Image (tube, rainbow, N blue to C red):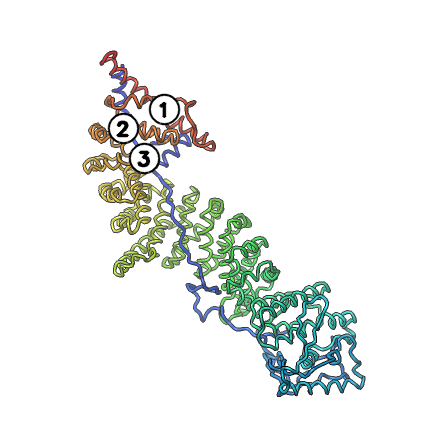
Amino acid sequence: MASMEQKQDKQEPFYLSHGARRQTSAEIVTEARRSLRIVNTQRPYTPRDEHRQLFGDTSSRTHDRRPPSSFSLHARNFEASDSRPSSGTRLSPLEHKPKLPLSLDDCTEGRAAVPKPPVENMVRKSSGGARSRHLRAQSLTRLPPMTQPSKVLQTEDCPNPSEPNKNSSQQMKPEYLQHIDDMAPSERQESPAKHRGIPRSSRAYPHATETKIEAEYGHGDQTGNHATEEESLFWNSEVLPVLQEFEAISLEGSVSEEAVQHLCDACNSLHEMLAEKNLLGKCFRKRSSILRALFRLIDLGSDKLNLTVAKLSLALSVSGNNLLNICKLIFKISRSPSNDVFFQNNSIIDSLLSLLQCEDVYSTGETLLYTIGSLKLLSGNYALSRTLLSKDFIGVLLRLSLRLVQMTEQKASPETDHKLSGHGQHDIAGHILVQLTAALRNMADLSESRSSFMSNNVFSTLCTIMDHHQEDEDICLNVARIFSKLSSYAGCCYALAETQCCYRLFLDLLSKHSRKQDLVVRLLFTLGNLAARSSEARERVYLEVGALDILIGLFQIYKQAAVVGVVAFDKHQDSQSPLHKEEDVLVKLIRVLANLSIYPTVGIALAANAHYVQLLLEEMEIRSVEDSMELVVNASATINNLSYYQEKCSVVRTQHSRISELLLRLLLSSNMDAVLEATRVFGNLSQIKDVRHFIIKNKVYQVFVALLDSKNPDVCFSACGVLMNLSVDPENRTILSKEGAIHKLIDCLRDFGPQDWQLAGLVCQTLWNCTEEGEAQNMQELLEILSLYSEQKYLQWPSVHDVKYQESCWELDFLPVAQKLKKRIQSQVNVLESISGPS
């Protein structure tokens, strides 16, 4: 009876086959582990741009075709009236120089005018009709002693213009200015100024400076049709002293760090006072006077102070060229990483975000450009990016991007073209989108941002942007970087996979920009991620017209380019050089094709494509594991996936001899990843008798037996697969037994059984083949192990999270073959005992 069972068993050896019966999930997982494999790789390296600017050094935009990142800004660049239109058209200067009013009311006929100081003691600077006057800095230390400064500048109780002493006071003012250069420093007398609610220094305000403030800003004590007494009192008692202080300090030209902090505090206090009185925006009649004083502080050259000035200027709703210059000023400040601390806990970020939400994109194009440029730079700071995320920065950017896309759709209109050409002939909408997509790229680094990217149709919007700007390499590259980052995470990858328009778009861009390596490598990396996680993505790529032709065409292009790169690399002998970009493209491209080949239709088509298989084998021939490890391993993994398909049209099957020679090189290398991939391929190809003969003839089986000693269960699993196929041939079993394969297989079963029931089941199948002739070596030990592992109550599951899966593998992969093997061994032991008799 036993001999009949052995004879029946002898006709049914186990193969590492690709049978059609895959009825359970555990069997499917086992089959995938044996053959088809997802290939992974590192994300393309993007060096951080150390020079904060609008456009990086690698931008496709030439310097003469893009707005500048560096510029100078001074007080003279701003317009005191804040009424000039943003079109850039400047009005001709007036012949008549109107005199400034003394009060909040407009000057009327019959009222006294402010006398002009002597010309020789003034420095006049004008810009586009804007007028500013500055005393020489050294004049502050040469004023005569003053005992009653209040008589000169009367803000609480100014005399009536009709009174006689008005003229006398006007005549006094030029006299003080005329003596500025003649006074010694010791003659200056300080008079501390105090003001409620505003931090004041112990600095005295010289008579001439106070006189200049009167001339520049006027008194606010007079009432008229438009100015209320309350507003005049607020101006005289609260605002004017602050402006006097600004003027006095700004005349010095340079200030200490302490003075800068004092001015910042004064600006913030003024901001709070105006907010309390609801006088922010454009509702305050003396707003221009405040802006004029603020703009003069810019010449002090302090980034901290300038940001404070910019914040208050935005709160006062500057417009036109002043708004553009303020946004340029903020951008200039944001270019220095050391200034990031000034933006933290600063409401100016809210002001910038509000600017991005303006509806009129046409007339504010350049302003938006520098606004989003600043936020892009700030989003590179981790703390600030989290602040921006909490303020719905991603949502603001997406809404702006949709308006910009609408602009590009209307671009055919000549009128629209004129409106869009705010920077010469440049496409401002495109420039803004470069900054916008770069800001989103920075936000994609935040793990907290992924939920925002997975909602609100973000991926669809990004694809729309890329589609409308296929010719703009900068925009396409930024969006590709976003996809490259986010597709590395499962949730985002599945969300992108459901964006059906992305597949055709990616393929079109790969074809259009085939030699733009930075763009190509990121699109391929993204496609590889999609194909690794989603079977629907594999099918969608394949169904796109010409998809495989585009990918194989890229293979041909970069294979040729990489050969040139390798020659140059060898010539210069620069072993420290980074991976060639061409080779990195090939790594990502081969990975895409390897993952696509998991889909049966694609795998069969690629396995039958002689040109493609030839490209793969040539890469394995010309590359060494030591110099191009990832490329060679990925190529081997692709061959492994293709060798899974046994159709007659398979070029991989017909090229088995050449492939076996290449795999032998990998097996003999010191790189375990390469050894593992070669073993996996041999696991598929060893079903072919000629390949098994090659393995025995070249003693390659010794490598596989030795791999059973590996502590890596995947290595043992692959080695078992090859040995199981080898042991199908009776002539090979003795060879494997003499090599110690049975003993090592038993050790493998004992060591890995409770942790890996798939591996335990494969070991039992291999032992079944190797012990088919009644091999009695170590049978008692094997029988004990099988008996122990066949009882579930003796098992200790390695992880409570894997209980159901482990039980499934134990029941389906291990237990049936283990019981069958146990029955045969028990019969063999019984026969041997009956022959030898009782001991």
Identify the residue position indicated by label 1 in the image.
816
Q: Amino acid at mark 3?
A: Cys
Question: In terms of secondary structure, where does tag 3 sit?
Answer: helix
Identify the residue position indicated by label 3 in the image.
716
Q: Quadrant of the N terminus?
A: top left
Out of 265 and 446, give the one closest to the viewer: 265
- Judged left or right of residue 592, residue 459 is right
Neighbour tally class for label 1: few under 14, some 14-19, many 20 plus, Cα within 10 Å: some
Vertical arrangement, residue 726 with respect to residue 175, above or below: above
Q: Amino acid at mark 1?
A: Pro
Total label count? 3
Out of 103 and 696, give the one closest to the viewer: 103
Neighbour tally class for label 2: few under 14, some 14-19, many 20 plus, Cα within 10 Å: some
Out of 269 and 389, give the one closest to the viewer: 269
Which numbered circle lies on residue 164? Answer: none
Disc 1 to disc 2, C-alpha distance: 22 Å
Q: Amino acid at mark 2?
A: His
Question: In terms of secondary structure, where does tag 1 sit?
Answer: helix
- Judged left or right of residue 725, residue 388 is right
Neighbour tally class for label 3: few under 14, some 14-19, many 20 plus, Cα within 10 Å: many
Q: Quadrant of residue 814?
A: top left
Q: Mark 1–mark 3 contact, CB under 8 Å? A: no
Q: Quadrant of the C terminus?
A: top left
Vertical arrangement, residue 551 with respect to residue 20, above or below: below
Q: Residue at x 78, y 82 (%)?
A: 161
- Between circles 1 and 3, the one closer to the viewer is 3
- Outermost residue, top direction? 838
- Between circles 1 and 2, the one closer to the viewer is 2
Identify the residue position indicated by label 2 in the image.
743
Is residue 386 in view from this perspective?
A: yes
Vertical arrangement, residue 586 with respect to residue 137, above or below: above
Question: In terms of secondary structure, where does tag 2 sit?
Answer: helix
